[in-house]
């Protein structure tokens, strides 16, 4: 991660850390960047991408999230702690908190953008947002970090580039 180009997920994570943990996280990230530049692929992986792909498939009816989480954990035991937490948080929101209507949701255009922060000569990259439209033609944008939901009216379309 470059501080000049940071993903929204990482920025949110850093913002809510205690100052001493924030410094530790930034140092660890700098070490990872240096290792990557020297050719070390690292031992980690993309935890959120596969989960978010499964969550989107669940929303649009092509997969069942609890089963997909078990498949992901079976394929990589390193996901045994995080994936059940992501699953439970997402399903709590999806099944109990997001329902304004019982009409089905349909997929709409995904948002992927880079937002400049001029005073810091930096950019925040926004991706992996689930975009759905309900039966009332209202768009809902859900970001993986804590299943944040934003309801936007149909006339918002021309301002969707954040």
Image (tube, helix red, strand yellow):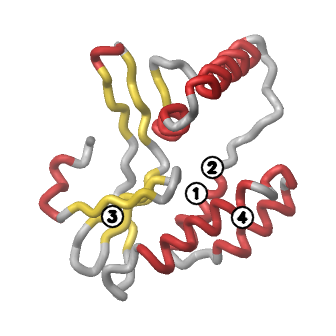
Q: Nearer the viewer, residue 157 or 13?
A: 13
Q: Along the polypeptide, which appears first: circle 3 or circle 2?
A: 2
**Position of residue 107 measured from the top left corner of the image (x, y, whole percent):** 39, 68
In three-dimensional space, the C-alpha distance between marks 4 and 3, rounded to whole angstroms, equals 24 Å
In three-dimensional space, the C-alpha distance between marks 1 and 4, rounded to whole angstroms, equals 13 Å
Q: Secondary structure at mark 4?
A: helix
Query: Which disc is residue 82 wearing?
Result: none
Q: Is residue 13 left or right of residue 37?
A: left
Query: Which disc is residue 140 wearing?
Result: 3
Query: Which disc is residue 52 wearing?
Result: 1
Query: Which disc is residue 48 wearing?
Result: 2
Mark 2–mark 1 contact, CB under 8 Å?
A: yes
In three-dimensional space, the C-alpha distance between marks 3 and 2, rounded to whole angstroms, equals 20 Å
Q: How many marks?
A: 4
**Residue at the spot 12% in from the left edge and 60% down from the top edge:** 155
**Residue at the spot 73% in from the left edge and 75% down from the top edge:** 67
User: In the rendered image, which quarter contains the N terminus?
Assistant: top right
Query: Which disc is residue 84 wearing?
Result: 4
Mark 3–mark 2 contact, CB under 8 Å?
A: no
**Position of residue 29 measured from the top left corner of the image (x, y, whole percent):** 66, 22
Q: Along the polypeptide, which appears first: circle 4 or circle 3?
A: 4
**Residue at the spot 45% in from the left edge and 17% down from the top edge:** 4
Q: Nearer the viewer, mark 4 or mark 3?
A: 4
Q: Secondary structure at mark 2?
A: helix
**Position of residue 121 measured from the top left corner of the image (x, y, whole percent):** 35, 13
């Amino acid at each position: 991660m470059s501080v000049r180009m940071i993903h929204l997920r990482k920025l949110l994570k850093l913002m809510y850390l205690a100052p001493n943990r924030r410094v530790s996280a930034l140092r660890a990230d700098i070490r990872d960047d240096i290792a990557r530049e020297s050719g070390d692929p690292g031992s980690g992986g993309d935890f959120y991408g596969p989960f978010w792909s499964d969550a989107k498939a669940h929303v649009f009816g092509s997969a069942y999230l609890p089963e997909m989480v078990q498949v992901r954990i079976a394929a990589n035991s390193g996901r045994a702690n995080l994936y059940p937490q992501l699953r439970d948080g997402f399903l709590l929101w999806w099944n109990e908190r997001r329902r304004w209507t019982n009409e089905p949701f349909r997929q709409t255009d995904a948002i992927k953008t880079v937002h400049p922060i001029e005073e810091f000569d930096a950019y925040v990259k926004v991706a992996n947002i689930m975009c759905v439209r309900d039966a009332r033609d209202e768009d809902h944008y859900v970001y993986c970090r804590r299943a944040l939901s934003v309801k936007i009216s149909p006339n918002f379309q021309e301002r969707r580039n954040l």
